[in-house]
Image (spheres, rainbow, N blue to C red):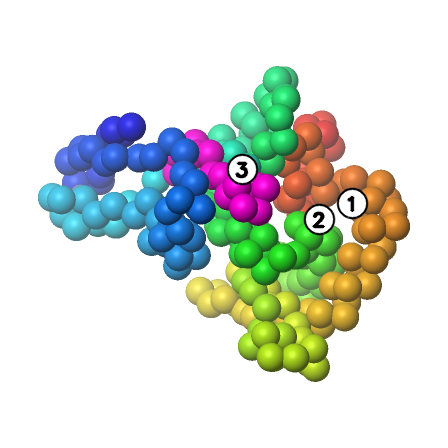
Amino acid sequence: MKRKIPCLCDNTFTAEIPEEIDLDRDSSYLGEIENGSFMSFSCPNCGKLHKPEFPLVVTWPSKGLRLELIPEQDRMGFYRRKKEKGDNTEAVIGYIELADRLAVIRDGLEPAVIESLKYYLYLKAAETSPENEINIWYHGRTAAAAQDGEGAALEFHIQGLKENSMALTHIPFSLYEKTAGDYAKHPRAELFISLRHKNYLSVQNMMLPGNLK
Ligand SMILES: [Zn+2]
């Protein structure tokens, strides 16, 4: 549908915003979401780049995936939402989390395990930089992992450790496998349950003020 996008230069322009995308039918979206160019628009008047977030349904039928994207600015509204989606739609909040989750699915990994590994990384980052606002995102398997099992690792990006730069960290694939084993045996363990709020699975749920849960 057409949406109005207001710019700081006082110009308002319209952009065609999809309400639902199917990644099997149009795989070019995958690359765009990955490299951040998805839903980027330049103001025709001043050239400023806009990355507005609108609600979106993302389906990937071959992976059995159906995601609802909630714009970051609606995060608190989502937590207060009474109505639960009756189907198997999973929620992600913000485009960065969308890109992260699609990378996890692309790499054939279990989202609950990735989110719990992120939680460990948050705890580690909070020890070294307690003052900073930290964000951690899954990026992908390292090249070593693609060739053989030796030295295989998962790469995460950490935002907020150093000013204006992204830090990289790697978690050995063996630790992923160990955590995946724990998850298979005890999916109702406290850590895994705490990662989920209704249809929203995210380490962000661990950072919630208690009254929202
Ligand atoms: Zn403008």
Q: In this image, 96 relative to 118: left or right?
A: left
Q: Secondary structure at mark 2?
A: helix
Mark 2 in CB contact with mark 1 (< 8 angstroms): yes
Evaluate whether residue 82 shows in this view: yes
Q: CA distance from mark 3 to mark 2?
A: 15 Å
Disc 2 within 8 angstroms of ligand 1 (CB): no
The residue under label 2 is: 112
Q: Tag 2: Cα neighbours inside 10 Å, few (<14), some, or many (≥20)?
A: many
The quadrant of the image that shows the N terminus is: top left
What's the residue type where badge 1 is placed?
Phe
The quadrant of the image that shows the C terminus is: top right
Q: CA distance from mark 3 to mark 1?
A: 20 Å
Instruction: List x then y, in percent, for residue 150.
Output: 70, 81
The residue under label 1 is: 192
Q: How many marks?
A: 3
Q: Which mark is residue 67?
A: 3
What's the residue type where badge 2 is placed?
Ala
Mark 3 in CB contact with mark 2 (< 8 angstroms): no
